[in-house]
């Protein structure tokens, strides 16, 4: 496997069926980014963009994604940041750290669902929230 150190970003409406290694596909209409795992394992990584999910920063030349990408459900368990079109590799995490991070994310989503934000609590967004929880593998 070849670990990447750079990604090229590409703004698209629809994510292509066949992904190219080293490309971060960004669909603003569908608030999603997708790329092949930067470790080279070939797994598809989907990061939904949302106030309580990943956030994308575009500085006019490069993109950054926050928080980090932790592929804990893949055999590779790769963990990295995407900052200014670069892959910054993070250290390995222990299972209790992974579980604690997932629990924090679950509580954050639950806070948004509690009605503190009426748009996120509306019936129209329930299926979207469910898809987000599934993509984040919180259920």
Image (tube, grey):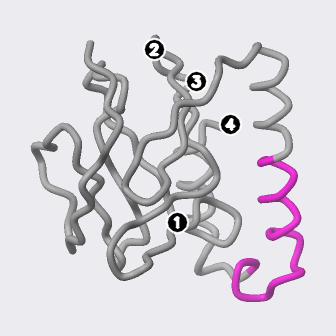
* Label 3 CA crowd tier, 10 Å (few <14, some 14–19, many 20+): some
Seen in the picture, residue 128 relative to 4 is either above or below; the reply is below
- Quarter of the image with the C terminus in it: top right
| Residue contact between numbered discs 4 and 2, judged by CB atoms under 8 Å | no
Q: Are marks 3 and 1 in contact (CB under 8 Å)?
A: no
Q: Image point 12% across, 48% down: which residue?
A: 17
In the displayed structure, 35 sits above or below 101; it is below
Q: Which residue was labeled with disc 4?
A: 139
Position in image of residue 128 (x %, y %): 55, 66
| Tag shown at residue 72 | 3
Q: What residue does disc 1 label?
A: 49
- Compute the Cα span from label 1 to label 2: 23 Å
Q: Is residue 103 left or right of residue 40?
A: right
Task: Please report the residue visible at 84 percent of the width from the left and 17 percent of the height from the top.
Answer: 96
- First to last magenta residue range: 105-121
Marked residue nearer the N-terminal end (3 or 4): 3
Q: Along the polypeptide, which appears first: circle 4 or circle 2? A: 2
Q: Residue at image x 59%, y 80%? A: 124
Q: CA distance from mark 3 to mark 4?
A: 14 Å
Residue located at (79% from left, 88% from top) = 118
Give x and y (percent) for residue 99.
80, 26
Label 4 crowd (10 A; few <14 / some 14-19 / many >=20): few
Q: State the image coordinates of residue 127 (x, y, percent, origin top left).
A: 56, 65
Q: Which of pointers 1 and 4 indicates the residue nearer the eye?
A: 1
Q: Which residue is mark 2?
A: 76
Single out the mark in the foreground, 1 or 2. Answer: 2
Q: Is residue 138 above or below residue 74?
A: below
């Amino acid at each position: 496997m070849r670990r990447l150190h750079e990604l090229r970003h590409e703004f698209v409406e629809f994510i292509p069926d066949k992904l190219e290694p080293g490309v971060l596909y960004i669909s603003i209409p569908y608030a999603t980014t997708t790329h092949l795992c930067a470790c080279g394992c070939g797994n598809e990584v989907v990061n939904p963009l949302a106030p309580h999910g990943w956030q994308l920063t575009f500085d006019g030349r490069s993109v950054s994604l926050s928080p980090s990408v932790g592929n804990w459900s893949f055999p590779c368990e790769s963990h990295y940041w995407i900052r200014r079109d670069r892959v910054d590799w993070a250290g390995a995490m222990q299972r209790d750290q992974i579980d604690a991070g997932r629990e924090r994310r679950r509580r954050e989503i639950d806070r948004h669902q509690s009605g503190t934000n009426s748009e996120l609590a509306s019936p129209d967004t329930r299926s979207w929230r469910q898809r987000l929880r599934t993509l984040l593998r919180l259920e």
